[in-house]
Each structure stands twice: as C-alpha cells, then as structure tokens.
C-alpha cells in the first residue's frame, strides 16, 4: 500500500476459516450486504464461497467443510494472515481478502490444522 506499511486488518472468523480484510479496500463488507439482518461474518462467508465457486476452487463443497471452534487455530490463522500481509503488502486499489482454513484436516495443505494464506 505504501512504504510505511500503514494498514490494518479486520478479521472475520467463519465456522471453517479465518478471513482478513484490509481496511480501506475498494470492496467493503457493507457494500456486499444483501439484507438488513445479514451479519458481517455471513456476508464474508457468502463472498468467500462465491469466489471459490466462481474460480472453480471449491474442492469439496461447503457441506464437507468441517466446523472448527478451536480458538488456538483461529488465533494462528489471524497471525498467519498478519504476517503474510506484512511480508507481501497489497497494491492499491485492489480489494484484498486473505483466507486461512482452520480445522480442515481433509486437505493435505492444512498440516497442523491451518492452511497457508490464500489471497482472494
């Protein structure tokens, strides 16, 4: 974004992943709201699943995603995203959503319960 790495992230914990979104991104969570009662985490989950489907990246389908309530894995996911963004600062004005799957042991890349960081 700039030389000072002056940015912050909002994190959304989904039942099966952690998503980090750069504040000030061109695409905001509020702009994706479909109804007044839709919660931010629901909006983010719908966006992520739609993105994965659109690009043909959904390997198992959402019904096979395992719910994960392990707070340690969720913290680890937030840490991985923060480290990734600091090491790979995003360019403007692209929206940046970062995804870490948590507790999805059916994927080989989820060693230790977390996946690598995926940039959406």
Image (spheres, rainbow, N blue to C red):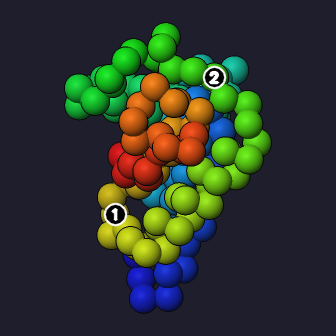
Q: Looking at the image, is mark 1 or mark 2 nearer the viewer?
A: 2
- Give percent across and percent down for residue 46: 48, 25
Give me the residue at 67% from left, 45% from top: 74
- Give percent across and percent down for residue 85: 47, 67
What is the crowding at mark 2: few (fewer than 14 residues within 10 Å), some, or many (at least 20)? some
Q: Which mark is residue 93?
A: 1
Q: Which mark is residue 43?
A: none
Residue 56 lies, with reference to residue 22, above or below; the image says above
Horizontal placement of 44 versus 96: left or right?
right
- Give percent across and percent down for residue 62: 46, 16
- Residue 10 in view: no
| Farthest top residue in view | 63
Quarter holding the N terminus? Answer: bottom left
Task: Give the mark count.
Answer: 2
Q: Secondary structure beneath disc 1?
A: loop
Q: Give the alpha-carbon distance from disc 1 to disc 2, as whole Å.
A: 33 Å
The answer to the question of whether label 1 and label 2 lie on touching residues, with beta carbons closer than 8 A, is no
Give me the residue at 42% from left, 88% from top: 3
**Foreground of the two, 6 or 85:** 85
**Foreground of the two, 79 or 42:** 79
Q: Secondary structure beneath disc 2?
A: loop
| Farthest bottom residue in view | 3
Give me the residue at 50% from left, 81% from top: 5
Residue 44 lies, with reference to residue 63, above or below; the image says below
- Give percent across and percent down for residue 41: 63, 33
In which quadrant of the rendered view does residue 87 lie?
bottom left
**Foreground of the two, 97 or 61:** 61
- Residue 64 in view: yes
**Foreground of the two, 64 or 39:** 64
Give me the residue at 37% from left, 51% from top: 119
Sequence-wise, the earlier of marks 1 and 2 is 2
Residue for badge 2:
67
């Amino acid at each position: 974004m700039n030389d000072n790495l002056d940015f912050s992230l909002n994190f959304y914990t989904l039942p099966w992943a952690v998503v980090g979104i750069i504040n000030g991104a061109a695409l905001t969570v509020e702009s994706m709201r479909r109804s007044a009662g839709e919660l931010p985490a629901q909006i983010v989950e719908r966006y992520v699943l739609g993105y994965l489907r659109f690009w043909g990246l959904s390997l198992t389908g959402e019904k096979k995603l395992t719910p994960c309530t392990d707070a340690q894995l969720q913290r680890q996911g937030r840490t991985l995203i923060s480290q990734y963004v600091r090491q790979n600062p995003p360019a403007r004005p692209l929206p940046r959503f970062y995804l870490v799957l948590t507790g999805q042991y059916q994927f080989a890349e989820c060693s230790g319960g977390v996946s690598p960081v995926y940039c959406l």
